[in-house]
Image: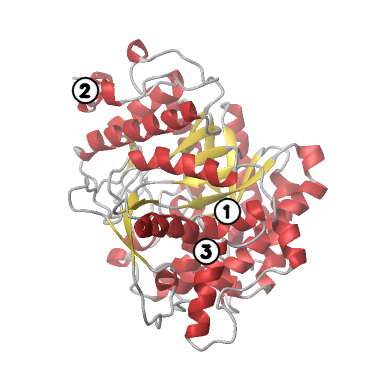
Amino acid sequence: MNFQETCMLILLIASNFVSLQSLNTKQFPANFMFGAATAAHQIEGGWKEDGKGENIWDRIAHSTNAIHNHENADIACDSYHKYKDDVAMLKYLSVDHYRFSIAWSRILPTGFSNHVNEAGVNYYKKLIKALQSNGIKPMVTIFHWDTPQTFENIGGWTNEMIIDRYVDYSRVLFETFGGDVKYWLTFNEPKQICQEGYGAGIKAPGIMSHGFGEYLCAHNVIKAHAKVWHMYNKEFRNKQQGQVGITIDSMWMEPETNSEVDILAAERKMQFTFGWYANPIINGDYPAVMKEFIGRRSILQGYNKSRLPAFTTDEIRYIKGTIDYLGINQYTAMLVRHINDTDKTEISWEADSETFEYQPDYWEATVSDWLKVTPWGMRKQLNWIRATYGDIPQIITENGYPDNGTVSLDERRINYLKQYLSGIRDALDDGVKIIGYTVWSLMDNYEWYRGYSERFGLYRVDFTNPERTRTPKLSAEYFKNVSSTKCIVYVSECIDEVVK
């Protein structure tokens, strides 16, 4: 049996793995975009090639034992040299767009805009040109976690100095690539940047500053986003006709019980995760429940004001409405219960929400300990966003399934994608304004602290081969069918019904 025949067989098996009766088999609208995603540090390699500067992930991988198996991204998928292969893979998948990020320190080696690295500029120009030549829209993330180390040496995202430096960097990107890029995302997953990077310390730069660092970081990230949006709006929008959004991640928070306290706890946790960033950018200020809980706990802990920084009246006006579309990273769900925290002495973002979250053992597990298969959460979250923030256009910028290199798990990936896409199609029927879906990820890559132990790719990458050979998994064939037909099942099983 050849590869194509094998693919057709697995598609048949996978199509029967989930009952068609449980799936929304309506065709997606013709203008609905399907795409694939990566991030610069996770795929490019060439970590100090052609003048690139050091970033915080380079530093933590080279100077600590934090990364699984002491692995690093010095070569990763070698996309710095193999970008043409990446584009060929995207072309085969028939995608409409490719979401990738630009490495700040590859464009500005020290982070400052006084020296622009032409080799880095040329790399991204060639990538963008290759995408356009193949009819693929570039969707560019300006910042995907890779702060230049020079800035981290003076506090990184907890130092408000970085706001204007980020604006300078963004201006370089708009001036250099803006004529060819219509979709920009300022930040990827700011909660992970701040809460895991500066609060819990479980992502680079590995700072443990519970209850303080994550709030300082978030305050600066939100102001930086707003300043870049205004800059684009004033200086570039009329000529370039692009859109500027942000990607926010959250698990769906499902109440453990139907009790009022658990329902309120689940809503509170959504506001402490998604609303932390969405509410200021859309409505101008932090969620009221965050201000209430953090403020009350701070006073009881002996502080004379809240550990959550406050925006001024002018800042609220300036930040409000600084978004054209909203990127959503959604993978899984949690059950949430209220915690009756009587002493309120613990100082942390986790404790401030006064909730407890967990995933039951009976939920379908994956090789990632944080990710269980909960497709029902996708529809609920997309509807929650609409109900909470109105009809802002949404695009799924990440969603995917991990394996550990075991081929048999790819059947589960196909099943996962099918169920989650069905939930998205349900949300479209509900009236949610969803403009696209982006699978994570195009290929196996460097998964941060987990190194190469968890693999989300539609393409397998052989990290033991100097050529970093890419091989399509069976899920690549499935996703190609989805992208090209706008159907999550075979066309013969797909209902041709356009969303009103």
Asked whether the viewer can see residue 246, the reply is yes
User: Three-letter amino acid code at disc 1?
Assistant: Ala
**C-alpha distance separating marks 2 and 3:** 45 Å
Q: Is residue 215 above or below residue 88?
A: below
Q: Is residue 86 above or below residue 498?
A: below
Q: Which mark is residue 289?
A: 3
Q: Earlier in the sequence, mark 3 or mark 1?
A: 1
User: Three-letter amino acid code at disc 3?
Assistant: Val
Q: Are marks 2 and 1 in contact (CB under 8 Å)?
A: no
Q: Nearer the viewer, mark 2 or mark 1?
A: 1
269 horizontally vs 124: left or right: left
Q: Which mark is residue 278?
A: 1
The structure residue drawn at horizontal position 67% and vertical position 62%, both measured from the top left corner, is 224
Q: Is residue 462 above or below residue 6?
A: below
Quadrant containing the C terminus in the rendered view? top right
The structure residue drawn at horizontal position 71% and vertical position 43%, both measured from the top left corner, is 178
Dot 2 alpha-carbon crowd within 10 angstroms: few under 14, some 14 to 19, many 20 or more: few
**C-alpha distance separating marks 3 and 1:** 14 Å
Q: Which mark is residue 16?
A: 2
